[in-house]
Amino acid sequence: MAENPGKPKKPTWVIDKERARRAAAAETVWLFGLHAVRDALANPAREKLRLIVTRNALDRLGDLHGVTPEITDPRVFGKTVPLAPDSVHQGAALEVKPLKWGSLSEVALRQAPGEKRPVMIALDRVTDPHNIGAVLRSAEVFGARAVIAPARHSAPETGALAKTASGALERQPYLRVPNLADALIQLKGMGFILIGLDGTSDAVLPDLLADLGDRAICLVMGAEGPGMRDLTMKSCDHVARIPFAADFGSLNVSNAAAVALYAASRP
């Protein structure tokens, strides 16, 4: 009997890619803490799955925006919700799907109301969720269009990141891209000037920004210690440092982002 060929067998790499896509679609995040949960509930773009609260937290949350809560006893909250033991949850946790902000080009070219110049932030190998949460908060305050980071070497959306961001995760685009170098090339093609931040540079950031006028910029920075990778550094059009008064001259990446964003937002 002749063998029935049926459908052609898919290559292994295609099967792996489809599995990864399905896994990503199934990924969920537990947000915790009254502020993070309240902001996520108010975000119509956020897909909400389960809201678990204590009676006290429920009274403090306010509008649940149509989400039905599951009320639990405070003494068993930690067993009901899969959170780290040190999570300051305040009796509120919300299971959600990660936000979908659209493509890099869609976000990068989306003009913000009242912005003086288009600003993006690129983070290279910044894996601490608290640092990224703080960067997102500063990005929202100073009107950056988005924060981008490589998918494999950055913190994903987590409850700890959301809590540090203090609500900014719901409003400030955070894009984890497959390849940071490719994303930087795309931004160049869209007219962005890439400025790497490095404490050893001779150029000073405020002077460089003044020379660029209102040109669109992307501030590129790496984690403390390793800093930017060589390829990331080579992708930058300029490298500059934040001026400092003392010899130690080193800032945490989230603090450096806040200072650089403030400088970029000035007229």
Image (spheres, rainbow, N blue to C red):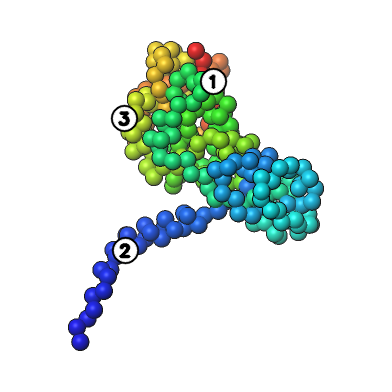
Front-most of 203 and 104?
A: 104
Residue located 46% across and 58% down the image: 23
**97 sits to left or right of 176:** right
- Give the foreground label among 1 and 3: 3
- List the residue tagged with mark 3: 189
Say above or below: 61 vs 15: above
The relative height of residue 184 versus residue 48 in the rendered view (above or below) is above
**Residue receiving disc 1:** 262
What's the residue type where badge 1 is placed?
Answer: Tyr
- How far apart marks 2 and 1 lie (CA) works out to 48 Å
Few, some or many residues within 10 Å of mark 2 (<14, 14–19, 20+):
few
Q: Please state which amino acid type lies under the numbered disc 3.
A: Gly
Q: Residue 4: where, in percent of width, then height?
A: 23, 79
The type of residue carrying mark 2 is Thr
Q: Residue at x 34, y 34 (%)?
A: 186
Give whichever of 181, 2 is nearer the camera.
2
**Residue 99 x %, y %:** 52, 44
Quarter of the view holding residue 195: top left
Q: What secondary structure is marked by label 3?
A: helix
Q: Nearer the viewer, residue 264 or 2?
A: 2
Q: Is residue 61 visible?
A: yes
Rendered position, 219 above or below 169: above
The residues bearing labels 1 and 3 have C-alpha atoms spaced at a distance of: 25 Å
